[in-house]
Image (cartoon, rainbow, N blue to C red):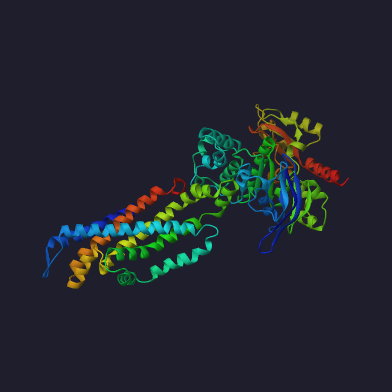
């Protein structure tokens, strides 16, 4: 409950700040962005994040689970290590490197965001299976469940909340990283923030940054609810 | 029912876990695999349901080579209970117990009925527990559900790997007794792995004592205690085998049925006469319904006129199925040399005297050594 109050307060402050700057109309010699601009950029930002997270999920979840299977376990280290490299490189660098490789445009931005957002999903998918109590799997085997039944009835339901947490973390990170997409020709709220940077006007920076933060908080909260909903009843805290 | 023929397990790293074990377990028998950790007992057990594959040798179940049966089919007909339980946390107690029935394609209503039956059998309130989740249960309750789940598909064979290992000693003794009672009804063929000699003696019809992957002695518990085959067995059994022999005898076998009693309203004088006639220094006090309430002891006879004035109430009792070691320990806490044996409703069924315990032990030892 307290957690929710803090989030709601933050969200109100951020949206309030955005509305305030927008209503100023002019900051120094610069006009502030209009509500129309804000809406357009927010939508573009969200679309970019959404596409990137969907792709990262489509790659990360199956791959993370796949490397827990016997016979493929040797691949776990290189795969997760590889994804980690993607995230140790500063986000700016990952994005910047895409321009010479894939040219300017949305595609470069999305590829960079996928690379950057993949690790949490991949790692959580992997650990979600790996941390299941081996006694549970042994009992299931001993009772005559085959591999498919164990995966479907035991492993996936138990892994679901952890995988979902990975997707949530990745989404929140990607909302932030997407600010930089504008550098390689992407769209989004980064355009507003960057305009503020070039104009050396803190309030315009705020006009881009505040809605971005609000989006990260809102999406994080939303996905937390999904996570809770996906958690099997027997695993929930009383 | 189960026959192991020169079974060997050598792991790929060269560890010889099981070296030529041959063993036969009859239908309805409870065979304990006993030994120090690393002796190969668990490996031996897991080769029966093929969780571990044997390197060489054959295992027959009901005359059928177990490698000729589909492994999952085989396992669905062999109940499996392990120390760490492995209850499925996202499934209710009912669904956990219904795992194998579900695999066998039983309809939902039948699975639920079966789960309730088994909860009842393990003395858990079926309606109160069937929809609970494992995390809502105590340790002892979880162990019960673990056993119930192993019995779920009504398999003729049960494999139990230290099933009562992870609980406190008092709960463990209770569960052991209940399992033995259930076993008397169900007559499953059971392979029971433990490292606890007391548990082995109490539970086993036969004990297979293992060491370093070999079967050292395979015999009924009394033989193991009183006729150890070699130094290792004698050492494992321990010097206090007399004490361990107490695990072999149940109170009902040696208790004094219809012992002398007294009623609270009776005159002490009548009671005194009864004690002198029987040559004892106690009387069990029972109420009108036959429920045990306490003791009259000879040293207190002078303190009043009526039995109720001189009796000392006592709640320390045992049931007829308790083994002598449990009964003796209760007797010691009571400070008397006699213990009341009661039924479920606390009605007096008999008394157990210290002399009776001594005699029973002497007889047990003689029987084997003759």
Camera-side residue: A44 or A213?
A44
Residue B104 is situated, as x and y percent measured from the top left of the image, at 57, 39
Query: Residue lying farthest front?
Result: A102
The residue drawn where x is 67% and y is 60% is B11
Query: Residue lying farthest top?
Result: B288
Classify residue A27 by image quadrant. bottom left
Numbered-mark total? 0
Query: Residue lying farthest right?
Result: B370
| In this picture, residue A59 sits left or right of residue A133 | left
User: Visible in this render: residue B197?
Assistant: no
| In this picture, residue A167 sits left or right of residue B280 | left
Q: Is residue A91 above or below residue B304?
A: below
The residue drawn where x is 27% and y is 63% is A106
| In this picture, residue B332 sits left or right of residue A44 | right
Q: Is residue A4 above or below residue B257?
A: below
Residue B76 is situated, as x and y percent measured from the top left of the image, at 61, 43
| In this picture, residue B261 sits left or right of residue A139 | right
Residue A67 is situated, as x and y percent measured from the top left of the image, at 49, 60
Classify residue B119 by image quadrant. top right
Q: Is residue B237 above or below residue B304?
A: below
User: Visible in this render: residue B226?
Assistant: yes
Residue B86 is situated, as x and y percent measured from the top left of the image, at 56, 49
């Amino acid at each position: 409950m307290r957690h929710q109050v803090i989030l709601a307060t933050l969200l109100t402050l951020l949206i309030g700040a955005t509305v305030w700057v927008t209503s100023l109309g002019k900051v120094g010699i610069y006009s502030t962005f209009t509500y129309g601009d804000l809406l357009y950029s927010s939508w573009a930002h969200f679309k970019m994040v959404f596409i990137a997270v969907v792709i990262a999920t489509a790659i990360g979840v199956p791959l993370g689970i796949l490397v827990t299977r016997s016979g493929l376990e040797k691949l776990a280290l290189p795969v997760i290590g590889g994804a980690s490299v993607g995230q140790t490189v500063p986000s700016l660098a990952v994005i910047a490197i895409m321009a010479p490789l894939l040219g300017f445009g949305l595609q470069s931005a999305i590829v960079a965001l996928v690379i950057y957002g993949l690790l949490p999903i991949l790692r959580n998918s992997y650990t979600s299976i790996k941390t299941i109590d081996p006694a549970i799997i042994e009992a299931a085997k001993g009772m005559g469940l085959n591999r498919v039944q164990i995966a479907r009835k035991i492993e996936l339901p138990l892994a679901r909340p952890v995988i979902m947490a990975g997707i949530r973390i990745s989404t929140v990170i990607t909302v932030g990283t997407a600010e930089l997409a504008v550098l390689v020709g992407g769209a989004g709220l980064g355009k507003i923030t960057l305009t503020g940077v070039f104009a050396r006007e803190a309030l315009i920076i705020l006009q881009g940054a505040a809605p971005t933060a609000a989006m990260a908080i809102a999406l994080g909260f939303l996905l937390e609810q999904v996570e809770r909903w996906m958690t099997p009843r027997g695993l929930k805290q009383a | 029912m189960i026959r192991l023929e020169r079974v060997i397990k050598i792991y790929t790293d060269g560890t010889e876990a099981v070296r030529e074990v041959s063993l036969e377990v009859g239908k309805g028998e409870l065979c304990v695999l006993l030994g120090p950790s690393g002796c190969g007992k668990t490996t031996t057990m897991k080769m029966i349901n093929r969780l571990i594959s044997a390197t060489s040798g054959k295992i027959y179940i009901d005359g059928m080579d177990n490698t000729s049966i589909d492994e999952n089919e085989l396992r669905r007909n062999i109940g499996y209970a392990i120390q760490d339980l492995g209850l499925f946390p996202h499934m209710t107690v009912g669904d956990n117990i219904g795992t194998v029935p579900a695999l066998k394609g039983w309809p939902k209503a039948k699975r639920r009925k079966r789960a309730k039956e088994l909860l009842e059998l393990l003395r858990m309130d079926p309606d109160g527990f069937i929809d609970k989740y494992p995390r809502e249960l105590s340790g002892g309750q979880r162990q019960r559900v673990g056993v119930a789940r192993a019995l779920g598909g009504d398999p003729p064979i049960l494999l139990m790997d230290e099933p009562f290992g992870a609980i406190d000693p008092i709960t463990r003794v209770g569960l052991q007794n209940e399992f033995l009672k259930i076993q008397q009804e169900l007559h499953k063929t059971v392979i029971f792995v433990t490292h606890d000699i007391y548990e082995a003696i109490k539970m086993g019809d036969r004990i297979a004592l293992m060491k370093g992957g070999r079967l050292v002695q395979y015999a009924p518990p009394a033989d193991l205690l009183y006729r150890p085959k070699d130094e290792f067995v004698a050492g494992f059994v321990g010097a206090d085998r007399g004490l361990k022999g107490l695990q072999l005898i149940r109170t009902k076998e040696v208790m004094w049925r219809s012992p002398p009693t007294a009623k609270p309203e009776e005159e002490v004088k009548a009671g005194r006469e009864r004690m002198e006639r029987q040559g004892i220094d106690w009387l069990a006090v029972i109420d009108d319904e036959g429920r045990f309430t306490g003791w009259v002891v000879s040293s207190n006879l002078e303190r009043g006129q009526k039995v109720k004035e001189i009796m000392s109430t006592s709640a320390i009792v045992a049931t007829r199925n308790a083994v002598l070691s449990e009964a003796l320990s209760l007797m010691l806490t009571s400070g008397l040399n006699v213990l009341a044996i009661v039924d479920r409703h606390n009605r007096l069924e008999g008394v157990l005297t210290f002399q009776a315990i001594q005699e029973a032990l002497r007889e047990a030892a003689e029987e084997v050594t003759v």
